[in-house]
Amino acid sequence: MISGSTSVTITQAINRGLKKITTPSNIILYSATVLCILFLIWDFSWRDLLAIPLGLLVSYLYSMYATPKWKIWAYSSVTDIHQFQRSAELAGLLLKGSHESTSGVMNSRQREILKKLQKKFLEEPVFTDDPSIPGETAIPEKSFFEIVSEPMIVLNDSGLQLRSAGYFEWSQIDNEHIAKISLNRSYGKEGTNIEIKIFFVFNSPTQHFEIPLSSLKITTWQLDLLLYIYRGRFMQKQTGD
């Protein structure tokens, strides 16, 4: 499929990866865990505990087989391969820096195709819009209760609205991205513990914002992709493209 159409959006590519790789891998692992528990309840034996590591092994081998096939399809189908790689890493589908690797279960032809596709990373990124993403997206606060309230963040091609700080145009925003931040937690005489959390961060003319992803009802890769799309649409309007 190396000569296929480049009309596949990043959203479509990631969703296909989740369907073809993540979901089956999780089903294998969860099934092995459930079978182990059922075996132990039915007739306890230490050998039954082998179901869990066996499930881990099968799940891993399946991912090693399915990932290269999907990766080749996606690399040959999306336009902005740079943003796709970032989205795939944030979605847990690809390892960071794996665009330089040809690891996985592949035949010689697949490996050769992948090496050719990796050369696309030497090209300049090309913004590609996703028509499935609406003109505006409201991101609610994550809550155990379904309470309708003002969203925490609203994104569109003009800027973003923060419930706690007001509206900012994209021209006022700098360095918006998803970041992992290390936090030192003190536990009295027991010392400190380093905790790593994921934040949505950006700079305004007067303030630096760090919003924990754990407080937002959206996945990491989806928010990162929205930032890419809305910032890209804004830049297109500025240049008249």
Image (cartoon, grey):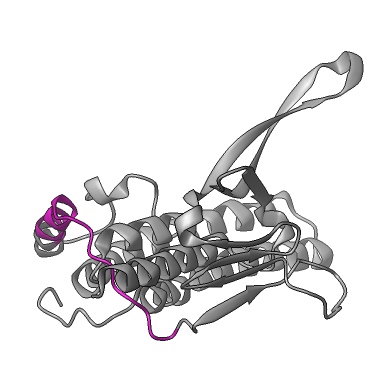
In the image, residue 15 lies at what x, y percent?
45, 76
- Magenta residues span 114-132
Counting the numbered discs, the total is: 0
Quarter-of-image position of residue 70: bottom left
Can residue 93 be spotted in the picture? yes
In the image, residue 114 lies at what x, y percent?
16, 59
Q: Nearer the viewer, residue 193 or 151?
A: 151
196 vs 76: above or below:
above
What residue appears at the point 15 percent right and 58 percent down from the top-left corner? 120
Q: Nearer the viewer, residue 177 or 135?
A: 135
Horizontal side of 194 relative to 201 (left or right) equals: right
Residue 130 is covered by the magenta coloring: yes
Tell which residue pokes out farthest to the right in this image: 188
Tell which residue pokes out farthest to the top in this image: 189
In the image, residue 92 lies at what x, y percent?
48, 57
What residue appears at the point 45 percent right and 66 percent down from the top-left corner? 225
170 vs 210: above or below:
below
What residue appears at the point 40 percent right and 77 percent down from the top-left corner? 16
Quarter-of-image position of residue 195: top right
From the image, which quarter does the C terminus lie in? bottom left
Residue 119 is covered by the magenta coloring: yes
Q: Nearer the viewer, residue 72 or 148?
A: 148
From the image, which quarter does the N terminus lie in? bottom left
137 vs 58: above or below:
below
Horizontal side of 164 relative to 72 (left or right) equals: right
Quarter-of-image position of residue 109: bottom left
Horizontal side of 12 relative to 57 (left or right) equals: left
In the image, residue 180 lies at what x, y percent?
56, 41
Can residue 101 be spotted in the picture? no
What residue appears at the point 29 percent right and 54 percent down from the top-left corner? 104
Q: Nearer the viewer, residue 204 or 80?
A: 204
